[in-house]
Amino acid sequence: MNGTFIVNKVACNFSFNPTARLLTVLRDNGFTEVKQGCQEGLCGACLVIIDQQLVNSCQVLAASCLQKQITTVKGIGTLHHPHIIQEAFVEAGAVQCGFCTPGMVLATYNLLNQIPQPSEEQIKQFLDGNLCRCTGYVKIINAVKIAARRLNQGNHGKN
């Protein structure tokens, strides 16, 4: 099967098996920032945003995403032009092994687009389903708070 996906605002034509999951199609075509974790929709490593909905790409048939807007973590910021959220994760020390980071960043992005000034409880609710084995979540929660503060202040630099 062939089809066009809009990944990080770029039209991409991919060949794939009709039963392939979006995670597999993305990774097979170079989008390795989408991590393969549990493949059961429980860990959040494979999170992407499809038409402004945060989803576990391991649970979505690729064919259902044709012509849809798919955003990976590289779609919100890059190594040379990081998003405020990515900067906050680095500053807070919320990036250790890095395996969960893309999903955590996208979950944070989704949260802050819906609730610009979340409470700690709301942060925990939005990050629920994203597993991290390194940080103990304290640094991740701190990173979300830093990012929220900076986005609300319009401050893209460090405080």
Image (cartoon, grey):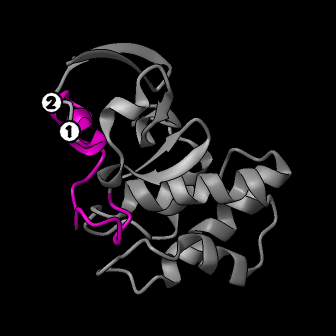
Q: Residue at x 50, y 78 (%)?
A: 139
Main SS type for the magenta part?
loop
Left or right, 153 with respect to 54, comes to right
Query: Residue 91: percent from the left, percent from the top?
Result: 51, 63
| CB within 8 Å, label 2 to label 1 | yes
At x 20% / y 39%, what residue is drawn? 20
Q: Kindly report the distance in space between the C-alpha atoms of the residues bearing marks 2 and 1.
A: 5 Å
Residue at left 17%, top 26%? Answer: 16
Give residue 81's position: percent from left, percent from top.
Answer: 50, 32
What SS does tag 2 mark? loop
Q: Which residue is mark 2?
A: 17
**Res. 159 in view:** no
Question: Label 1 is placed on what type of residue?
Answer: Ala
Quarter of the image where the N terminus is located: top left
Disc count in the image?
Answer: 2
Q: Amino acid at mark 2?
A: Asn
Q: Which range is magenta?
A: 21-45
